Image (cartoon, grey):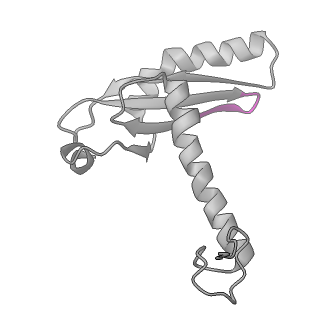
Amino acid sequence: MAWCENNGIDYFFGLPGNKVLQRLLDESADAIRTRRALERKFVLRGYAEPHCKAKSWKLKRLVCARIEATAMGLDIRFVVTNLDSGSAEHLYDLIYCARAQAENLIKMHKRQLASDRTSCSSPTRSAPFCTPLHTG
């Protein structure tokens, strides 16, 4: 994270939960869990965005927490970022999850083609996203 910040690179990293983060979210998580039960919803999702400073960090960073309450209990996921604009919901769902979805689609594409390349460097290679060049 420090390297990214020192080199002007925006980042998102998944962050494992810990007791400190759980304590910071106790009130938000309890509110989401209670609202889900009162509204009798199968699932209810909420977000929180505490600024935290881990022992190994030199500064506070934004942590986006996705809090999902179901009848089975809570599922909380954390990401840390140096972006400072947008809500936790926007940052988590529309940026972090979109990046992960793009990676999943690339992996699926490679598995389906049993390939390690997606370029058209060989005319005998079958690649669905390539079209032949027509000249003249």
Q: In the rendered view, tell whether residue 126 sits above or below residue 64.
A: below
Question: Viewed as shown, does residue 121 lie left or right of 8?
Answer: right
Report the number of numbered marks: 0
Q: Looking at the magenta stretch, what is its main secondary structure?
A: strand
Q: Name the one closer to the observer, 134 or 71.
A: 134
- Looking at the rendering, the stretch of residues picked out in magenta corresponds to 70-76
Q: Position of residue 81 (x, y in %)?
A: 37, 37
Instruction: For the C terminus, give its image quadrant.
Output: bottom right
Q: Name the one closer to the observer, 120 or 50.
A: 120
Query: Residue at 63% of width from left, 58% of height from top?
Result: 104
Question: Viewed as shown, does residue 66 lie left or right of 44?
Answer: left
Q: Position of residue 94 (x, y in %)?
A: 57, 34
Question: Is 72 contained in the magenta span?
Answer: yes
Q: Position of residue 70 (x, y in %)?
A: 73, 28
Q: Name the one closer to the observer, 32 or 113.
A: 113
Q: Position of residue 84 (x, y in %)?
A: 35, 26
Q: In the rendered view, tell whether residue 62 sits above or below residue 32.
A: below
